[in-house]
Image (spheres, rainbow, N blue to C red):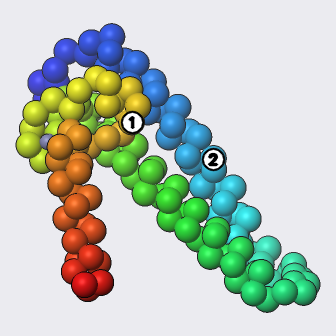
Amino acid sequence: MNARPRTPDMDQFLALLLQRRTALTASLREALSASGQGNPATRGGEVHDWKDDAFAEALKNTQSTEIAHLQTDLAAVRAALQRIEDGTYGDCVDCGREIGRERLQVQPAAPRCLACQQKAELGAAKPRIATGL
Ligand SMILES: [Zn+2]
């Protein structure tokens, strides 16, 4: 392993990412236990008296969207931490060019440069647009 020497910048991003990972892990744990997924044992014992099933359903959907979001964010943070470990942090995973400090300061877990990110998002959105036409 011959990792690139760490710059003060890298330490700053590492600290940001670790902080974010801690926060996301806590939020995820909270969201999971709120939805009953985190601790199935308490599920049967509690009696939920929902007057409005639609509301309960909507709440469940909101929770699972939130959980999915948190899981995605957490995966991105973990991947970024791995890239710091590998010495490739800050390089775009698609084109290999530098992502740029400004972008990383806003989004420390960003895996791509802005151009590649836009391309990736466009690519992901395309099939939906195509079926809509
Ligand atoms: Zn790129």
Label 1 – label 2 distance at C-alpha: 19 Å
Compared across the picture, whether 25 is left or right of 42 comes to left
| Pick the front one: 57 or 28 | 57
Circle 2: element type: helix
Please identify the quarter of the rendering in which residue 112 is found: top left
Point 21% across, 57% down: residue: 120
Q: Amino acid at mark 2?
A: Ala
Q: Amino acid at mark 1?
A: Gln
The quadrant of the rendering that contains the C terminus is bottom left
Task: Please provide percent x and percent y for residue 81.
Answer: 34, 37
State whether residue 89 is above or below residue 51. Answer: above
Compared across the picture, whether 76 is left or right of 89 comes to right
Residue under label 1: 107
Task: Please provide percent x and percent y for residue 44.
Answer: 80, 83
- Ligand 1's quadrant is top left
Residue 56 visible: yes
The quadrant of the rendering that contains the N terminus is top left
Point 40% across, 18% down: residue: 12
Labelled disc at residue 9: none
| Pick the front one: 1 or 77 | 77
Residue under label 2: 26
User: Earlier along the polypeptide chain: callout 1 or callout 2?
Assistant: 2
Point 17% across, 47% down: residue: 116
Please identify the quarter of the rendering in which residue 121 is found: bottom left
